[in-house]
Amino acid sequence: MAVVLDVLASYVQNMLTEMVKEEVHMLLGVSGDIDKMCTKLGDLKNSLADADRRNITDQSVQAWVRELKGAMYEASDILDLCHLKSMERQPGMDVVCFNPLLFCMRNPIHAHEISSRIKNLNIRLDCIKNRGTAFDFINLGLYEDRNRMLASSNLFKQETSGELDGSCVVGEKIEVDTRNLVRMMTMGEETSYGDKIFIFAIVGVGGIGKTTLAQNIFNNNIIQQEFSKKIWLSVNQQFDKIELLQRTITEAGGDHQAARNTNTKGALERILKEVLNGHKTLLVMDDVWNYEAWECVLKTPLVNVLAHGSRVLVTTRDIRVARGMMAEEPYHHVKRLEPEVAWSLLKNQVVGNKTHEPQIDSLKDIGMGIIEKCDGLPLAVKVMGGLLRQKNTRRSSWDNVLNDSIWSVSQMPGELNYSIYLSYQDLHPSLKSCFLHYSLLPKSTRFYVDEIVGMWISEGFVHGNSHDLEELGRQYYEELLLRNLIEPNEKYIEQHVCNMHDVVRSFGQYVARNEALVAHKIGSDIFGKLNSQKFIWLSLETTGSELEELEWSSLQVQISSVRTLISVGHINFKPSDSLLFSRLRILHIQSAKFNAMAETFFKLKHLRYLSIKQTNISRLPESIGKMKFLQYISLFGCESLLKLPDSIGKLRQLRVLNLCGTSINQIPRGFGLLINLRRLYGFAAQMDGDWCSLEELGPLTQITELHIRGLENIPSASFASKAKFSEKMRLHYLRLGCTSSHGHDDGLVKNEEGKFEEEQRLIEEVFDELRPPPCLENLLIVRYFGRRLPKWIMATKDLRILAMIDLPCCTELPDGLCQLPCLEFLQIDAAPLIKHVGPKFLHPYHHKHLSHLENLGSIVELEVLQISELERICNLPKLQRLCISMCPKMKELEGLPALETLKLEDYDMKTLPGYLKDINLRHLQIHCDIPLLASIAKGNSSPEWDKFNHIQQFKAYTNDDNDRVPSKWYASYTRDPFSFETNYISPPTLVSGDGEEQGSASSASRKVRKPLPASRCLRRFPSEPDK
């Protein structure tokens, strides 16, 4: 549990408060001890914020913090055991309706044991508290006051200016971004405030290059000519309103002395108005943390006096600042540096004399290793360049920099520490713990948001009403996103998967270093670290080549104190091994042969989170019902698992259960007792005589996300009604699916002896009965073989995301689908028989096949795949991203004013479609066959040139034969600044993947091609198994 002290103390206090309440005086001789523990924790909390801050770098504080955390962990263990004993003794009683500590104390044996432990713990807390006085901890008070005090210190007084260091401007990307932003800032008459001011935002994590880009814009020649006044303000984390107005007057060319001698806001506003009245002004606000710097300080004096066409450019780490300032969307997100660009930046920091450049170039292989560790973060590259500048230009010196421990935050120069520490220190204590937790996850493994939030809840980081913990955890996740501490993976819808920048991750791991061990390359040194220190958090990631290096038996002996264990990859589990972790709260084992350990689960009494993804486990023991604290279980990808134990219904605190990718087709009776379930994935619809598993869903009124499969097994709509979908008023995500037993081949469904029509009628009735509440936001329908979609779709007015995948028999979409007011994302994949979409959806006439997509007023992103008759897409005013795959008759795109990105896949097209000439795109990506790419590769001499030369960025790809090497050949074009490159060379003959020679490129082009894979085109959904 990598957790800040403040959060851990609150967690323990909450446990005490919930378990004792008004009956403390009745406890057998321990009421005073319980009171003392509460008091001591309350007194210590006054010092915890300062202790946490100093713990990062002050070694003298670190041992004290470790001991205090150890005492708090022990307190939570004691209270857990009280709770557990009470549940075991009174299994029929609702655990929230009685006092478990009271019950435990009335049992003499348990009372004596617990009383002794509490008294000893109080003595220990007394000693810790007394030793803490020597550190003179400051009572930083509330979170807001703490940040204000810290921000006022000299550490946080780092200001920027509009002056540009040319050595930091490297690569084409920053020049392209500069030109694009300059063009947007100097064109158009529409404005945001009183027809005077347009606001633009540059957003990104600290150190990503926001300030450098803003400086490059500030010094651009067009900007210099366009604006009569140019003001650069370094705003920073905490600002003084009076000082900000004074600096603005000075930067605008006003009377510096008069501004300094004026200390009232009104008088300073009048001076500022006089200085800027009638001037066309560019105001750059760098490093803004709070939109009130604009809204409450500068907006009022500027909005009515600046000349028409004035602009504001803001840089910020937090998207909410851009929103609060009502900046124009989309905001400009600064991306990481490409390796070659980063190498140029590193060289600029190291090379003092051009004559030394060849010597530095000879070290490029080592330099690129350093660049890789910097992960494209410009500030990190500059910091490392400054470090290398102090070294000899010898391979041994650079090797030492690459391989030594200088990547720990404590030994890196303060500039990088400052940048990341600022973002960390600005977090609420609970968010700090969530941030540290995220940084400790195995880097190469994909974790979905529901997994991460489940861990946070299990760790005790998320405090609030038990009904809303997942929602609150998701808010924490989104705040890390808004602050750019994590970044969304664009392959996944709704930001279900994110990444963390390597340098940010390294900072988090450094802060948690005294409690957490992260090992991604398992070797002998891991055992040395485990022997020398007790860790609370252990994160392991192994590869197949390390199969013999990590034995569970040798590992478990040394990690008895671990409370969180995450292991991804191969570990040798033997039948004689067991799980000997008396304190474990979180267990995540992935891609391991774990079956031998199944019977030892019941020993993990404190466990809240159990994930055994993609393991070979074949059964869960009945003893799992004894694990009363379990809140989260993921069996994702456990293909050998055939059934759930009957005791699963005893886990009354279970909130999340993921059965996707398993072979579980039998749901035990009594499943409906899991009334605390919030998320249920992979639930199997089945019949057992007159009993239907859907009945077990009826009592689950708290469910928010639900995935049901195998609905073709339900013989009557009356059984579906027992699921009581309409009563689940918190349901916002629903996935309904059939299995592939009614599969199709080339769009034709098997029809044995005429029975299939009856099965279609039944499945339509079953789906009609599974009517969700109107609050549903996300609907996914998979392998549905009905001829029409459920009647209730049009009643889900809050629907934002609708995906329909593999509909072999569906012939029409419902009328008015485009009228759903909140619909943002529509995906229709493999629906070959759609003939009619309703008069309000598209067109007043019926068609043999879907030929038009029109009037989808709210759609932002659209994917159309394998719709053979589709000819026209038009009048989608908000559409920004469009993917068209295997739609050979497409010939018209019209009325798409917001369209920015188009992906087009068709391996049979001979030329690029003519409609490309008439649409204004920023990005166009084509996947075609070899002859067309060969033509495109001719550049401006190609007959295709006029169809794409007006597009800012164009890329064309073709695959090698048999799709064995995806995107082997390519052509890439950028309009401004101009560039064109290709790796295509026309060969005299082509050799296919199996060695057969082909006479020409055209003969190779006749290979059958597959649609775009999910990673390239389709967004993944949270409960979807990997393909």
Image: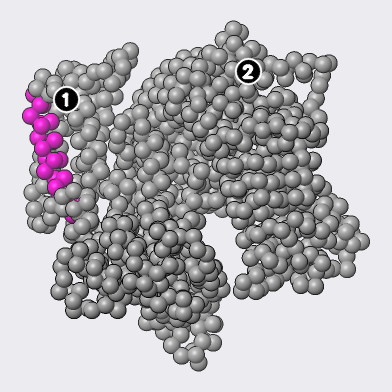
Question: Residue 470 vs residue 432: left or right?
Answer: right
Labels 1, 2: front one: 2
The amino acid sitting under disc 2 is Val
Q: Nearer the viewer, residue 81 or 17?
A: 17
Q: Is the magenta region chiefly helix, strand or loop?
A: helix
Residue toward you, 888 or 1020:
888
Contact flag, marks 1 and 2 (Cβ < 8 Å): no
Name the quadrant of the C terminus: top right
Question: In the rendered image, which quarter is residue 914 located in?
Answer: bottom right
Disc 2 crowd, CA 10 A, few/some/many (<14, 14-19, 20+): many
Q: Residue at x 31, y 31 (%)?
A: 465
Q: Position of residue 692 (x, y in %)?
A: 57, 13
Specify how the rendered protein is coloured.
Answer: one colour
Closest to the observer, 532 or 213: 213
Can residue 994 be seen here? no
Mark seen at residue 825: none
Please indicate whether residue 856 sits to the left or right of residue 246 in the image.
right
Residue 455 spot, x, y in % from top left: 39, 39
Question: Which region is colored magenta?
Answer: 29-51
Furthest-bottom residue in view? 355
Which numbered dot is residue 21? 1
Amino acid, disc 1 = Lys
> What residue lies at 61% left-to-right and 8% top-to-bottom?
689
Q: Is residue 170 visible?
A: yes
Task: Residue 740: give x, y in percent of width and height.
Answer: 70, 28
Sequence order check, earlier mark of 1 and 2: 1
- Residue of label 2: 766
Quarter of the figure with the N terminus: top left
Tell me the quarter of the picture where residue 273 sits.
bottom left
Q: Residue at x 55, y 51 (%)?
A: 490
Q: Residue furthest top?
A: 690
Tag count in the figure?
Answer: 2
